Image (spheres, helix red, strand yellow):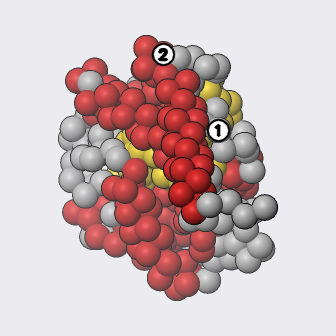
Amino acid sequence: MKIPRRTFLHLAAGGAALSAVSHGAIAQGYPTRTIRLVVPFAPGGAFDAIGRPWADRMKPLLGTVVVENIGGGGSSLGAAAVARAVPDGYTILLGGTQTHVNESLLKARPLYDPVKDLVPIAGAAAYFLGLAVHPSVPAQNLDELIAYAKANPAKLSYGHAGIGTIQHLTGELFKSLAGTPDIAQIPYRGTGPAIADLVAGQIPVGVVGVTGQVLELHRAGKLRVLAVTSPAHLTAAPELPIAAELGFPGLTVTGSIGLLAPAGTSMDIIEQIAQATRTAVAEPGYRQMLLDAGMEAPVNPGPETFRQALAADVALWAPVVRSLGLKLD
């Protein structure tokens, strides 16, 4: 039966209105249950130091957020679990530079496409790395560490958060710049286990994310941070030398941490989580918590700014990965 044009247009308009109402109703009803935040590393380290305080601050804004640590693959396993999750806003990822660089540059067979399978929500923090040694290592500064490594080939090794992590890439970049190729790399399932072994003397050197825990261990003499990768001195530890002033400007490394959702998640939900994150990031207590931990708050934690930061990170590391010839599979 042929429907008159006027009737067709009326029905079409009604259908569009119904769709808009339904879409709005979904967004207005969100969230109605617990949100799962996947941290793609073992407990401990910079990601955990951000994920749990963020989850706590979401309680009055979004309701209960539970943190689930899924380590392995240098963040790949946890990020892939979120990329495959139902895009309903109830499973989100605490990812960032790590989750994008790993799959974009280091994998011939990536577990997910970080650009197509994950949608940026908001930045939550910027973090830096530290080159640290166990107190038994006879090096008080970076020059002495390099001299010791060259005088004792194959004696030193360094631990990091996992193959393909920014810590791993930074460690290999340091070896290349310092001319110490014999320092072996030892991967862990996150920064937490690497720090534990570094403090215990199981590994002599570590490339770790700077956190409040790392700064406390440094001050207690349980490990010794020889340099940090920040572009300027850390507010929380201005006494620590930065790599650039020690003759390694190429070792200036900043990582982004933020929230991502599975592709297909409603933009209304994305914006709702982004707005809640903006509120948290603007809170003086949150910003001070970041500074005390040797981190910084993002200037603009919105979705587009976070997307641009991640794209810039991949572009920054691409020539480094090529020059080092690193591949994970």
**Residue 27 or 53: which is nearer the viewer?**
27
Question: For residue 142, what is the image quadrant?
Answer: bottom left
Asked if the residue at tag 1 contacts the one at tag 2, i.e. Cβ–Cβ closer than 8 Å, the answer is: no
Q: Residue at x 75, y 50 (%)?
A: 84
As measured in the structure, the alpha-carbon distance from the residue carrying label 2 to the one carrying label 1 is 19 Å
SS for callout 1: loop
**9 over 122 or under it: above or below:** below
Res. 147 visible in picture: no
Q: Which residue is mark 1?
A: 88
**Residue 267 or 99: which is nearer the viewer?**
267
Q: Which label's residue is closer to the chain start, 2 or 1? A: 2
Q: Residue at x 54, y 57 (%)?
A: 6
Percent position (x, y) of residue 198?
59, 41
Q: Amino acid at mark 1?
A: Asp
Report whether 80 appears left or right of 89.
Answer: right
Percent position (x, y) of residue 313?
43, 66
**Residue 43 or 143: which is nearer the viewer?**
43
Q: Which residue is mark 2?
A: 59
